[in-house]
Image: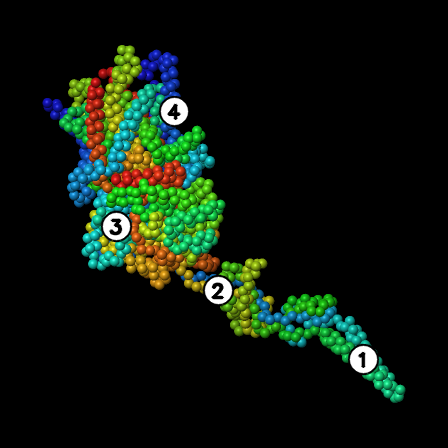
Amino acid sequence: MERREGMKSSKKNKLKNLLKFTFLLAVTIMLLFPVFYMITNSFMSKQEAANTYNLISSASEGNTNKMLSFKFIPDMVTATQYYSVFFKEPKYLLMFWNSIIITLPIVLGQIVVATLAAFAFSKLRFPFRDKIFFIYIIVMMMPFQVTLVPNYIMLKELGLLGKYSAIILPGIFSTFGVFLLRQFMKSIPEEYMEAGKIDGAGYFQLFYKIVLPQCKGAMASLAILVFIDNWNMVEQPLIFLKDESMYPLSIFLSRINSEELGLAFACGVIYMLPTLLIYLYGENYLVEGIQLSGIK
Amino acid sequence: MKYKYKSLFIFLLLISLISISSCNANKKVEKSETNRKEITIYILCSKVASRYSFALGSYDGVQVNPVYFDDNLEKLQNRLNLELMVGEGPDVVCTTDDRTTDIVKSVYKLASSNTLIDLNPFMNADKKYKEADYNKIIMNSGIYNAKRFFIPRLYAVPALITTKEKLDVNDINISGNRWSWEDFLNTCKNFMITRKDKRQALIFDYEGKLLIDLIANSKTQFIDYSSKVTKFNTRDFISLLKDYKDYIYPVTMTDTESNENALLADDNLAVMRNIQETGDPLTYMALDGYLGMMDGNANQDQKNSEAYILPSYGNGDIYGLPREMFGITSRCKYKQAAYDFIQNLVKSTNINIGHSPIAGVAVYKPLFNLSLEAAAGKVPLTDIGMHPNRALNGNEKIFFGIVPEVSDFRMNDETVNEMITSSVDKYIKGSITAEQAANEIDRKAKLFLNE
Amino acid sequence: MELNKEENRKNIIKNIGLIFIGLLLFLTYFSKTISNFMLPQIDKCTPASGVLVSDIETQGVIVASNVKKLYATTQWKIKEVKVKENQAVTAGVELFSIDMTDANIQIKALENDISFSQIEIEKYQNLFGSLETDATATAQSKRDYELNLLEKQKDLALKKQQLEAYKAKFPSDGIIRSAYNGNIKNIKFEEGATYMEGQPLCEISIADGKFIATFQLNAIKATSLNIGDGGTFNVENNDPTATTAGGSNQIIFQGSVTSKIYATATSTYNYEALITPQANTVKDGDVVNVNASKPSVQYSVLVPKGAITHLGGEDCVYVIKERSGALGSENYVEQVKVTIKASDDFRSAIDVQFDDFSPDIVAYSTKPLVDGMQVRLR
Amino acid sequence: MKLKHKEAIAGYIFALPSLAGFSLFFLFPAAISLYYSFTDGIGKSKFVGLKNFISLFKSESFLLAFKNTILFNLVSVPLIMLISLLLAMLLNNKAKSVPYFRMMFIVPMVIPVASVILVWNIIFNQFGVLNHFLTLFNIKPTDFLNTGWSFPILVMLFIWKNCGYNMIIFLAGLSNIPKDYYEAADIDGASSFTCFTKITLPLLTPTMFFITIMSMVNSFKVFREAYLLEGSYPDFSIYMLQHFMNNNFTNLSYQRLTTSAFVMAIIIFILVLGLSKVESKYGSS
């Protein structure tokens, strides 16, 4: 597309781009608002941050008639929150590591498992394929609470309860990845496969040589999305990990009280970074697409 | 260069993962399935344990051992829920910890969840059990759908506590310890008129439970679990709300208002200031017969304490709020032992929590009478399990003196309470009318019942 | 070109990621060290039951139990002083002499006056005697004469009395003597000075073997020494003549507190203890070492004074407890309000309700503590 | 024939790890909970047939929740599809500024829930910024979070949170469309709109199918925010199945939970079936 616009770049296009730009800017501001708020507030003193929270809570309890308002400019810019997160209270650092311990294996595992399965479900014909896949989808759409009790019992039987693997293993085998990749692999033209078969390549080679290179973008997006999903996971650790020292950061950040608010903001900033970095790293795959598609 | 980075990165990560997972590993507190003969009970905080301590013995070889959740209510509730659902959890369930905390939010939902067993067979089999010994009305609060799921240990009667001096100083005179609704309203009105300038609070509404208890204490039972009927959207309830907003709320001060952190609206602030000047509100609410709460407050001299049973809306009856109801879970291995344990608790003379004050009055009549005598000073405090060095304070004396035979019970349900308070807050803020509030509460309660 | 830029971008991101992760790793690894480094270090101690020994050691002064004052009986002019401060005197010892010149003149005058009036009386009588023989004398005149005579005689008697009274105010030889045995204290007179009637001249402390030891204590110590309490007193006797049975010049004797008065000026308690040493071993003015050490009643909880912190009028101690933190179990302190019953130099008896039976409490901390603060044991 | 066999075997082999894990951690539990929905309790419980289902359909709460859930999906899913697709199209070029924008759309997903809730609270609270703003035009402040307004607000929250998510997938989908198709069309002199309808949309159908379903899944997940924002008994307009299930969970009536879940599952099944039909219809064209 870019190239084409390059060829016949006229006033109309310029205007269009300008419109695009402004629109995107507007949307972006809307989206960035909370982050901005969080970052600015993370530089407030403990008490100052707590005040906002108390104000809200008391407002929702109806003890006040004060109007709430966003406070972007701290009265006293301090890094005390970061200081206490980094130096004084290592438990938040440990929580961060717990998050990583839980998330990384899931991401890696799921990518491996999902690509294999997706290949099968999309490119290989075998009995009950679509029915199985149906079940995949439906089970995936079940809310968490439904299968919770049997899950709990099962994990207990397997002796995984209270271990990281109680969260990691189900995470790895979540059907989301399969579903996503399958959808993308479907869109890879059959001709490639046929060509490969004619060249006498085995199924694994087909998978490795032809399909895999073409759904880089999909895999990147999978990695990002899975990471995000599990990075924000709250319910499962809360239930399957009895030991609070194993809780990930997301749990702490999902329920906060007034005196921890300042800390939470600081933690939140740290919490955001990995996801953003990973996104930035994989981002170009998303748009890169298939350049070599024409050449054969 | 690039590879150096990569390898370093991976190396670091590996180290981190290993080190951290190991550092967590050594703190595993996995409670393995012991096949010792034992029954467990979950207790919120170990301080309360003294209340159970005497009973935590062994019952024909079955050891009772408590699991403490050092004051982490949320943790306790989550774990209790989950474990009961997956057929684990404690053998004996206690609905409340003390007056202020309900471990089980709504008792009858628990009863209807098939996780508890029917206690009637045990009672019938029990030779020592004499129905006359128990307060029948309160005992029946444990029955749901013709099955007895709970045995209550205590019941509480909401009462207003103050001291004679305070009443005299502010020339409030109340005839007798039993108020009619009208007396109560009139007192509030007069107070409002006389004190409008001074902006003082007549009632210290501890934890904002006043309205809840007024509702609980009213003639019509607004919510019926077994028949899934709610009567919140009735004229009674609406007028009750109106009375509350117009006369009672203006003269009350909740403890959130007395908490400095809470940002107060100006008029509340005025109340607040005044209270800080005068030391404390003129009267304290002491709810659910939790009379010792005054220990915490400024009013230290209990000599001329006065207790007034909270007026009942509609008629002069008194309603008891069952506390500390004990049930046995269906997964319990040693049900008989569990039953014995509960009976022992209920009959035990130890109705209060060591230093902290009693959470209610005993359902077991002999014990109730005993505490009456203790209040009258006929028997030593230790006989009702009070800490010897803690004098039975005036409130309890009076309270025991005036606590009457209750005519019915009202079950406290946190879930419904939350609905009521949230809607009433809006009503008081003026964003909705009383009718709307009543309607909202009614619909939510219906939702809740029909779930 | 395009790809190169891409690579650079990626590298930058990767480096950021590495730095971030590395930083967190570093901090995690050293987190315990850092936190320990910042934690207040404390010494612990266990409160014990026992008694407070309130040893009171102070110096006092010995004074005689009763003291007589010497006043000027009229206007005296001191001629010569015969004693000095703190001199032991017995009854009849000369204290000082008075300049008698004026007095003698006065006396003379009076005596002359008397003798003159006597002569007058005699004259008068003689005159009347001549009258008796006179026949013309009437009863009337006779009565007048007797009246006059009586009047004159009365006058004479009066004058004589005045003389005696005046004389009585002076020693005949003009020398004032001590009336008691004891010793002289704070002489207020000096030679040549004149003193009005009723003015104190000196004191004589009676040597009857009864003495009072006076000493002072500050308020805290005073709490443990009350009227009636006994104590041992000893005097460093520097007077070689007075030797005790022991031969040493260290005289020890018992006594008991007789009065305890609060002196607002010095905000101390003034004590008086009645002591009865052996005869003439001590004299007043001696410096005495008071030692009234006495054990208090049995207290259940005794803690070092350092363990008690005063904040906002309330005293409290910090109990050391253990909890499981992010990095394994950690120690923290819990504030417990206490009321101080009594205390001596080192320890205080407190009234407190601990949760568990005998907790460890903080004896000393490198930083000010807060309730629930994590601490590190030395 | 033989080839077919080989392919089938290969297919099973490729799918095996996923299949095994899936059936162990998802299918089997689901089956068990399906069984529970026909019993009267956990543990040694007895079979009660369809009793649970009947009582479920008697309960007004369930019906309300059911209605709301469907309504919510009907409103929010198409909306988010449109918006995210639009954004994806806009962002699917290599203009300088674009990557930065793209990044921004990730952000709502990476912010911790608590701070999101905080912000939304400050905006929509009774005394919130919005009301503050409205009072300037002396409009009476309304409690947005506890009135009929809460439904559109929840939809907004949902879109705000998830449009980046969908956008990523769309981007990936767009990137998978071979460029030469466009070039071909370009040579034929087709307008960019026809390009969109004739090339982009058909080739995007698998992605769209996926996104539709994912949006539904996420619409269940938005419950977390709704719950934190308005509690377990919110305004009736947003009393969703998730609320129903969660409340039943806290009230220990697990039968209700499973039963309702399977009623839902049936609905989903039909829906997915329909969608996949649509997909296969367009995808092949």
Q: Quadrant of residue C185?
A: bottom right
| Residue C293, numbered label | 2
Q: Are marks 2 and 3 on the same chain?
A: no
Q: Are marks 3 and 1 on the same chain?
A: no
Q: Is residue D163 above or below residue D47?
A: above
Q: Is residue B166 left or right of residue B331?
A: right
Residue at left offset 10%, top offset 23%: D2
Q: Is residue C104 above or below residue D241?
A: below
Q: Is label 2 in contact with label 3 (beta carbons under 8 Å)?
A: no
Q: Is residue B299 left or right of residue D263?
A: right
Q: Are marks 4 and 3 on the same chain?
A: no
Q: Nearer the viewer, mark 1 or mark 2?
A: 1
Q: Is residue A76 left or right of residue D68?
A: right
Q: Chain of mark 1?
A: C
| Residue B142, numbered label | 3
- Residue C51 location in percent, x, y? 43, 62
Q: Quadrant of residue A169?
A: top left
Q: Chain of mark 3?
A: B
Q: Quadrant of residue C8?
A: top left
Q: In whole angstroms, how far apart are the C-alphas of marks 2 and 3?
A: 67 Å
- Residue C61 location in percent, x, y? 57, 65
Q: Is residue B372 above or below residue A190?
A: below
| Residue A26, numbered label | 4
Task: Say what secondary structure mark 4 lies in.
Answer: helix
Q: Nearer the viewer, mark 4 or mark 3?
A: 3
Task: Please name the colour scheme applied to the rendered image.
Answer: rainbow
Mark 2 neighbour class, 10 Å CA radius: few under 14, some 14 to 19, many 20 or more = some
Task: Say what secondary structure mark 2 lies in.
Answer: loop
